[in-house]
Image (cartoon, helix red, strand yellow):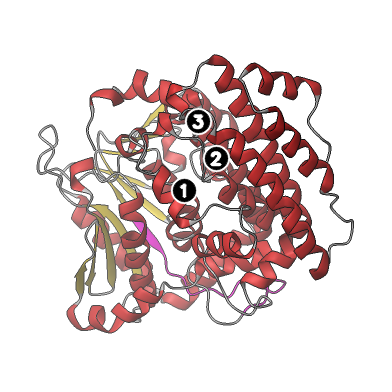
Amino acid sequence: MDTLNPAQRRALAAAGASPAGVKALGRAMTALRLPGRPTKESLAADGRKARAIYRAGGALLAAWPPRPKRDAAQAVAAETVKAVLRGARNAFARSYVDLLYSRATGGYRRFVRAAELVYAVADLCPGLCPTRREVEAELQLTQAEKDGVEIPQSDFLSHVFAHKPSGDHLVHAMLRPLPRSVELLARFRREGRLDLGTAHVERRGALGCVLFNNLRYLNAEDDGTVVPLETAADLVLLDPEVQVGLLRGNPVDHPKYRGRRIFSAGLNLTHLYHGRLSLMFYLTRDLGFVNKLYRGLAGDGYDPDGPEATLEKPWIGALEAFAIGGGCQILLVLDYVIAEEGAYFNLPARKEGIIPGVAPLRMPRFLGERASQHGILFDRTFPVDSPEARGLVNEVVPPGEMGAAIQRAVDLAAGAGVISAGANRKAIRVGQEPRDLFRRYMALYCREQADCHFSPALIGNLERNWDAKNRRP
């Protein structure tokens, strides 16, 4: 690697960095020369050299106060060091992603979920990704206080997805049923309903209902909803008695909306502001719960070059009140959306400062590119009875008639059987969002969402648009 440039050295000197520490970082950087053809032997040697860079950079950062207490010069110097470390990690991951992924998965024989993968890499190559203890420690801080310890996780996954063999394998791994879902299946089939905390799942004849149940936060999504929602979706897909899935919000107890069903308030911005939303939330959600709604469940067989062979069923959405942000993203992967009069959907990404999941890829198919740009970049809200919204919403019904509309849609969808429904979903998807397009999108999303999640602009957006300072988690 290139050593520190003059501007970087000046920034470190201005912050009072130890000359010996600066020298150690520069020397470690020049020692790492990544090969054009990586081998297992070079991985071990280069891993040791990379760790010297991480240690030297970490020692410089540790000499300065925590992020909120740094003066201007220390803040610039800290960002300089973090940029150097990020560059070193990305260069190493780019060279060795295939070998590291192969080791973590037993030569591509085991399917390892994304959250497990990044911690396996932390053990294989210390410093390349953070440890669980490091991540848990930073999750105790507010978002404004964080240094971005989790960024290397998302960066590494970006390289995994950019590398087709590992990216295809990880997409498949994330589409497999959760082990907990498999354990709960017999009980669900026997009892017909399960309370999973922030999600409920019920079977009503041929209909499998996934009910948002994060009531305090108007059915918003956060780290506490990811596994329950994915588990509920798994159970609907796994139960052979269920032919159609439904997504609907449970009635909330918020004073303003007490007793009303609300589809989803999107991302839990209160948790985000207070630092309780992990970076892996975004990736786990979109690779797991949301992608399973769209693509179904992957089985034991793995054939990345063959046609998709997932277990899938049609999904209906009952849009009551609103589908904000993440709620709108979910509508984009459903097969039939029934909306209550007066409801709306939007993607307030500009107000939040993040990427709205996979919506930038999917929304133009429904609303057109110009309307999608308006919604994503300029905060346009779409009432369900507007002309543009009808590209996404199939049916608008008066209040009180949602139940009957759902039953009509279930009768239509269930009449032809699950096999043909799954086959037609696959056939439609081939021309709209093939697996390779999704994989390449995720390579970009992993990197860019990390930048957004830890951007100072995000804090300002939340304070300005969400009154985040005065909200308590």
Of mark 3 and mark 2, the one earlier in the sequence is 3
**The disc label shown at residue 449, or none:** 2
Question: What residue does disc 1 label?
Answer: 282
The residue nearer to you, when weighing 309 against 127, is 127
Of mark 3 and mark 1, the one earlier in the sequence is 1
Mark 2 is on which residue type?
A: Gln
Q: Which residue range is magenta in the image?
A: 302-316
Position of the N terminus, as image quadrant, is top right
Relative to 82, say whether 93 is above or below.
below
Residue 414 drawn at (x, y percent): 35, 71
**The disc label shown at residue 376, or none:** 3
Residue 450 visible within the image: yes
Relative to 191, say whether 393 is above or below.
above
Mark 1 is on which residue type?
A: Tyr
What whole-number distance in Å separates the C-alpha atoms at marks 3 and 2? 15 Å
Relative to 34, say whether 302 is above or below.
below
Position of the C terminus, as image quadrant, is top left
What whole-number distance in Å separates the C-alpha atoms at marks 1 and 2? 8 Å
